[in-house]
Image: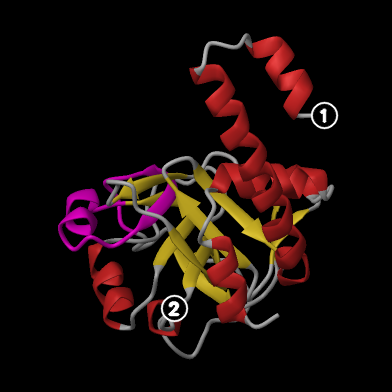
């Protein structure tokens, strides 16, 4: 399945729908990037796109340094996924970076770490998901080390370049491309069941028997 077809299929569903489908498929943690939430812009925003991954390290750590600023690695239709070392007080993403990403037609950024300049992101309506915020810039704390490498989120859950990231007000999930078709089919099946369940509950039917009848 092409990336464009995969995205069109997934765009009918929320992160909750997709996470439930991935649990059924036994994908680690249902693809849920636990602890990451939307800081900008809100208002029902959803983003869907293939990942561009960025590994951040502490400034004095040994290892490679990209030839370009990592913000310049954004691409149209993609979502940048940034992993920052745990426990640092600083942000690794700010308003200037969102300005550059938006110019490159990025769909948004997902940060396993901290961001800052919340109001600036909201003013430009650029989607930013993060673990938290900070008043401190990266400056002497972190630097980009590698771009488009596999990154371990938690246990067996990894984010790979070109994995499909989906973010909305519920949170963020990551979908491996080989699972997209099955995820779409399962989401559609559950959506139809949920519609019947909702109709029954609105008609006054009790929750227990309704769930038992429709969600076997």
Image vertical order of residue 34 relative to residue 182, above or below: above
Q: Nearer the viewer, residue 120 or 162?
A: 162
Q: Dividing the picture into quarters, in which one does residue 75 lie?
A: bottom left
Q: Residue at x 60, y 67 (%)?
A: 164
Q: State left or right for residue 19 relative to residue 80.
A: right
Q: Quadrant of the C terminus?
A: top right
Q: State left or right for residue 17 relative to residue 202.
A: right
Q: In the image, which disc is placed on residue 174?
A: none
Element type at mark 1? loop
Residue 95 within the segment the image draws in magenta: no
Residue 104 makes an appearance in the image: yes
Q: Position of residue 176 (x, y in %)?
A: 72, 65
Element type at mark 2? loop
Q: Residue at x 26, y 81 (%)?
A: 103
Q: In the image, which disc is placed on residue 77?
A: 2
Residue 132 within the segment the image draws in magenta: yes
Q: Residue at x 39, y 84 (%)?
A: 72
Q: In the image, which disc is placed on residue 216?
A: 1
Q: Nearer the viewer, residue 116 or 159?
A: 159
Q: Position of residue 68 (x, y in %)?
A: 44, 88
Image vertical order of residue 7 relative to residue 193, above or below: below
Q: Earlier in the sequence, mark 2 or mark 1?
A: 2
Classify 10 Å Cα crowding around label 2: few (below 14), some (14-19), many (20 and above).
Answer: some
Classify 10 Å Cα crowding around label 1: few (below 14), some (14-19), many (20 and above).
Answer: few
- Total residue callouts: 2
Q: State left or right for residue 118 relative to residue 170.
A: left
Q: Nearer the viewer, residue 105 or 23?
A: 23
Q: Dividing the picture into quarters, in which one does residue 132 lie?
A: top left
Q: Residue at x 79, y 48 (%)?
A: 28
């Amino acid at each position: 399945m092409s990336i464009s077809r995969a995205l069109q299929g997934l765009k009918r569903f929320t992160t909750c729908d997709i996470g439930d489908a991935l649990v059924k498929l036994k994908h680690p943690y249902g693809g849920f990037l636990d602890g990451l939430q939307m800081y900008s812009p809100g208002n029902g925003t959803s983003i869907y796109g293939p990942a561009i991954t960025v590994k951040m390290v502490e400034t004095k750590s040994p290892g490679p340094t990209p030839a370009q600023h990592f913000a310049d690695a954004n691409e149209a239709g993609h979502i940048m996924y940034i992993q920052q070392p745990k426990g640092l007080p600083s942000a690794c993403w700010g308003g200037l970076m969102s300005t550059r990403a938006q110019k490159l037609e990025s769909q948004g950024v997902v940060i396993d770490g901290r961001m800052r300049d919340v109001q600036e992101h909201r003013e430009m309506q650029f989607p930013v998901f993060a673990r938290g915020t900070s008043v401190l810039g990266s400056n002497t704390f972190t630097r980009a080390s590698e771009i488009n490498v596999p990154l371990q989120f938690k246990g067996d859950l990894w984010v790979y370049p070109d994995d499909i990231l989906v973010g909305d007000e519920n949170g963020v999930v990551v979908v491996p491309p080989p699972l997209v078709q099955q995820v779409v089919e399962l989401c559609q099946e559950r959506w139809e069941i949920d519609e019947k369940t909702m109709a029954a509950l609105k008609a006054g039917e009790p929750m227990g028997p309704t769930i038992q009848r429709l969600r076997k």
